[in-house]
Image (spheres, coloured by chain):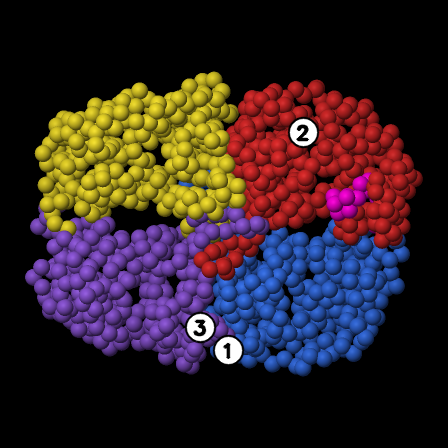
Chain colours: A red, B yellow, C purple, D blue
Amino acid sequence: MSDSNELRVAVLGVGVMGADHVTRITSRISGARVTVVNDYVTEKAEQIASQIDGCRAIVDPLDAIADADVDAVVLATPGSTHEKQLLACLEHGKPVMCEKPLTTDVATSLDIVRREAALDRPLIQVGFMRRFDDEYMRLKALLDGGELGRPLVMHCVHRNAGVPSYFDSSLIVKDSLVHEVDVTRFLFDEEIASVQIVTPLSNPAAPEGVIDPQIAILRTVSGKHVDVELFVTTGVAYEVRTEVVGELGSAMIGLDVSLIRKSAPGTWGGHITPGFRERFGRAYDTEIQRWVDAVRAGINIDGPSAWDGYAAAAVCAAGVESLHTGLPVDVQLAERP
Amino acid sequence: MSDSNELRVAVLGVGVMGADHVTRITSRISGARVTVVNDYVTEKAEQIASQIDGCRAIVDPLDAIADADVDAVVLATPGSTHEKQLLACLEHGKPVMCEKPLTTDVATSLDIVRREAALDRPLIQVGFMRRFDDEYMRLKALLDGGELGRPLVMHCVHRNAGVPSYFDSSLIVKDSLVHEVDVTRFLFDEEIASVQIVTPLSNPAAPEGVIDPQIAILRTVSGKHVDVELFVTTGVAYEVRTEVVGELGSAMIGLDVSLIRKSAPGTWGGHITPGFRERFGRAYDTEIQRWVDAVRAGINIDGPSAWDGYAAAAVCAAGVESLHTGLPVDVQLAERP
Amino acid sequence: MSDSNELRVAVLGVGVMGADHVTRITSRISGARVTVVNDYVTEKAEQIASQIDGCRAIVDPLDAIADADVDAVVLATPGSTHEKQLLACLEHGKPVMCEKPLTTDVATSLDIVRREAALDRPLIQVGFMRRFDDEYMRLKALLDGGELGRPLVMHCVHRNAGVPSYFDSSLIVKDSLVHEVDVTRFLFDEEIASVQIVTPLSNPAAPEGVIDPQIAILRTVSGKHVDVELFVTTGVAYEVRTEVVGELGSAMIGLDVSLIRKSAPGTWGGHITPGFRERFGRAYDTEIQRWVDAVRAGINIDGPSAWDGYAAAAVCAAGVESLHTGLPVDVQLAERP
Amino acid sequence: MSDSNELRVAVLGVGVMGADHVTRITSRISGARVTVVNDYVTEKAEQIASQIDGCRAIVDPLDAIADADVDAVVLATPGSTHEKQLLACLEHGKPVMCEKPLTTDVATSLDIVRREAALDRPLIQVGFMRRFDDEYMRLKALLDGGELGRPLVMHCVHRNAGVPSYFDSSLIVKDSLVHEVDVTRFLFDEEIASVQIVTPLSNPAAPEGVIDPQIAILRTVSGKHVDVELFVTTGVAYEVRTEVVGELGSAMIGLDVSLIRKSAPGTWGGHITPGFRERFGRAYDTEIQRWVDAVRAGINIDGPSAWDGYAAAAVCAAGVESLHTGLPVDVQLAERP
């Protein structure tokens, strides 16, 4: 590989997720390097830039996107800034890997989809990293291979030990359910028609006013049923489990039992991966490596598209609506451009 | 044990289930023997009676109940005959172990409950055998011990390889869901407030006109959420799985992995128990032994009561109603006598 | 069942095991009752007898065997008394279910085998209860069905949380390994040709002078290899695991994972059955029920024979010899009468 | 990262393993690129070189090592050529990642160790990739954390579906057992004192004259016991399982159950990873990334050393000797330079 085609990446937002992406691209990804970092906490960006050969901190995110030393952009900034930054990427014709959400509302997401569609090729990939996880890929292969027949039902569990203090009831839908929405669309290759949120007895350990757990019931356009337990204050660990039930059988991933220990008197067991970084760290590596390869090959995306980001947003918006009534809410999708 | 207090049992109905009970009492249960059998197919009753020392076939079920040689009764007759037979048991003051359903409708079930309540002690036990299964008992002990905190959510799976040809959509509620209804009431010690039945895309292997799978969503009086996948034509095996999620953790039973085999090229796995007799055979033994012991001790029941049978019927009736609308239906229980 | 053919059993030795057998026969076994109990602690025998209708305590074990009110005998006495008691049973022609060991040395075991062989039908069954355990029976069926091809290798693990203070190094062979010896002979239907005991680094928690763990290496007559980890002071729980490796695949039992719990922060797991009574309690029930049925049917044994007891003793004697040298020791079996 | 310090790697030997390393370094490893490839099949080397920017094929392996465009070397050539190539690497002062075996006999391995020791810093890393596998690293961490107490016993299983036609009985020791030898030394941090190879009944599917399965019994210097089932013609899949038993508990890795499927009638299960590339592919990635990072940081090795390669060779040589006698053979290690 000659060094002239090594991809020069700007990483915008270097919080936990963005800093992980910087480390990833610098230390484990072939064919790319970080040339620009940006964060609204400028000291943080400067501190990170100083540790990487040939990397600068740029204060204004739009300047970072426009910079001549940048071939492609990773957005790990707050969702509220995505719209403006994505539009800048489209304007400069720069491929962008955008962490979810695409934008913070359905209308602007759709606008982004339409503006990108007006170009001759896609520029935006959305960071639904589960599509790159080994277990989900094996489950997808099993379904596509027909071994389970047509899928009819799916059961999902999404549990966190805890969440940041700013979490509220609707963030459980927009930030947690959104992953299962994408998993559903990825595994079943179809859109979601309606959402219902059922609210059981709430966990006393949940922050004041936050309804947790929540049960989401999705129905796809063809009538497949998906139920999702969302429980983000379990105090236990990070647990993500998926079971698909088809006409010919069922399959489950996520039991998380790689090392079995018997040591405390009378017990057996093991450790559950503590968080999403441990559980999906390798999926992120694969996601970024494949995105880098796609950008260098000129096809720009190899993963979820802006449309996937928009569709997930539309489903979650319906979910938030249902959160208040407990009744099923239909999802209205625009025609795909 | 002197032979004067060996319990003399009449078994009414000697189809698959009743014949199992006859074998059970004759061959594996201590302190009881079958003295009378009855079936509307009289040849079958006679053939069974002829193989057991001191056992007679009696043609009329009410005569069998009344017989002087009968201390207690096992009802394994069709549900439609239960009401009359239970009333006869009450009239003669004979303890009865009644296979589910108590009766075929809510009103008559309630009537039975009230008539029994007018007596000085209970006579009727209902055959919800899962309460006697080791795994359910361990799960109940875990909950009662407080290790999971207060339960908030439960996920149940109830799958059959196939069902008899007379099965219809409402029997999936009345015959399959009824077990999960009892499991819910048993594990949580509270009544169910509402039921919703969601009907996904149906399995093409299901009989014409039968909606299968179905998803039942139960809400208990205190607000606990229970979802149940009912799928009775999977073509795979008999699978019953339960996961309880509480404030402090979760627990799952039913993974069914006692023997692990690696033999076909590239695969590992094992056999799933083919049906309820294999899965719950020992629970039936325990149920009957404990019932025999209770009757001999004069307390008559050691397990689900007539009220449990009535409450399950009321929930299932609401379920059948929801089957047609897809909306939640409230359960109306009479005051407990 | 008429009461005239209910089997009248004398239970000799009412320590933990014998008392369990009394409860078992009295409360859970069909067709038998305990009419006589005996123990060298006479108060214990009397106390137990007083709780059972129609049961007497008899001070002398040989009187108990000879008693006119006794049809068959269960021996749960110390092994050192077995020879005399078994000879009395043979003399009186009374079927006997003898807890292991048959006798305490190879020569007297062989003598018992030969004296019984001189009778017209067997009288002695030996208490290797694993043959009646569901998992072992399923493994045996898998092997006999040919699904794994010819077995070549077996790995066994036998762990106790702890052992009584009188345990010494050779008891680990005679009391623990003996079960795996019988399992090997049961599953493979052939004799064992040699034994080697390897002694690793010892557990500091083992009693002074006791070598624990030990590794036993058995070779069958046809050349099959069996290794057994014997570790009786683990401090964890009772763990018994068996894996058979054949020409066409392998199978494992004993992972002991029926209830999976996730509650302590970051962990998942469950409880291991604490001891042999919990692990094999049902196997004992099945063993005794089948023995009772066999005696009542006049065939007297339905399980391991005196020869099985003798062969196990011969293998264990070779094991004790190897314990001192670490070298393989050949097993010399007499011709089977 | 400036391009001046990107590591330029020569890959010698581009068979299955070497070609994987070329792909790995080119597509997934950060900070390195392949500048030279070599193979005794020159067309293969040329074909691979032609697909990579800035990469040449060089016919003579020693020329490839000496090339000015090469900073470091990966040896994936046949073991018989390693000695000469390693000496060339030492002579030119170039770091080398050498696939096992270090050399094909103990004497030359020791010579390599001594010549490297005469330098001021190490140059040779040996390709025991299991040390970089997540499960082994978690097991190592568990042991080092003291949760299991001092390890006493380890059980290993090493099964292949099949092996190439040139495999013979001693290759099972030198090519398969060698991994468990390294795992033992890695997990226990001590040398192996003796080896015994037991040969059970052989698999009829094994090639003519090949003894398979074999059981290896290792004893460490402190007295820890390790047994290893080596079975390379199972016809099933690639299975690698390890259980460590310590003073305070046990732990097992390798059950390989990430996706559980229930589809064929009456069965449950999943797929076993078919071969070492699928099972340990990520361990290879980690191994090479960490080696590249170490070489670029000037410390040259971050993994098994030449001594580890020599010690494994010495144990396997003793194993081959035991293969003929079945008796334990002591391992004689030279003093570590």
Residue occupied by mark 3: C206
Pick the quarter of the image with the N terminus of chain C.
top left
Q: Position of residue B47 (x, y in %)?
A: 15, 35
**Which residue is at 77% across, 36% downward?**
A78
Q: Is residue C135 left or right of residue A101?
A: left
Q: Which mark is residue D328?
A: 1
Q: The residue under label 1 is which amino acid type?
A: Pro
Q: Nearer the viewer, residue C125 or B146?
A: B146
Which mark is nearer the camera, 3 or 2?
3
Establish if D53 lies above or below B81: below
**Which residue is at 72% across, 46% downward?**
A285
**Which residue is at 53% across, 41% downward?**
B247
Quarter of image, res A71? top right
For the residues labelled 1 and 3, say whether their Cβ atoms are less than 8 Å apart. no
Q: Chain of mark 2?
A: A
Q: Nearer the viewer, residue B28 or D65?
A: B28
Q: Chain of mark 3?
A: C
Q: CA distance from mark 1 to mark 3?
A: 27 Å
Q: Bin the neighbour count of mark 1 within 10 Å (Cα to Cα): few under 14, some 14-19, many 20 and up.
A: many
Q: The residue under label 2 is which amino acid type?
A: Ala
One can see residue A65 in this view: no
Q: The residue under label 3 is which amino acid type?
A: Ala
Going by the picture, which residue comes out furthest to the top?
Answer: B325
Establish if D300 lies above or below A301: below
Q: CA distance from mark 1 to mark 2?
A: 64 Å
Residue occupied by mark 2: A312
Range of the magenta residues?
A1-20
SS class of the residue under badge 1? loop
Q: Is residue B34 left or right of residue D57?
A: left
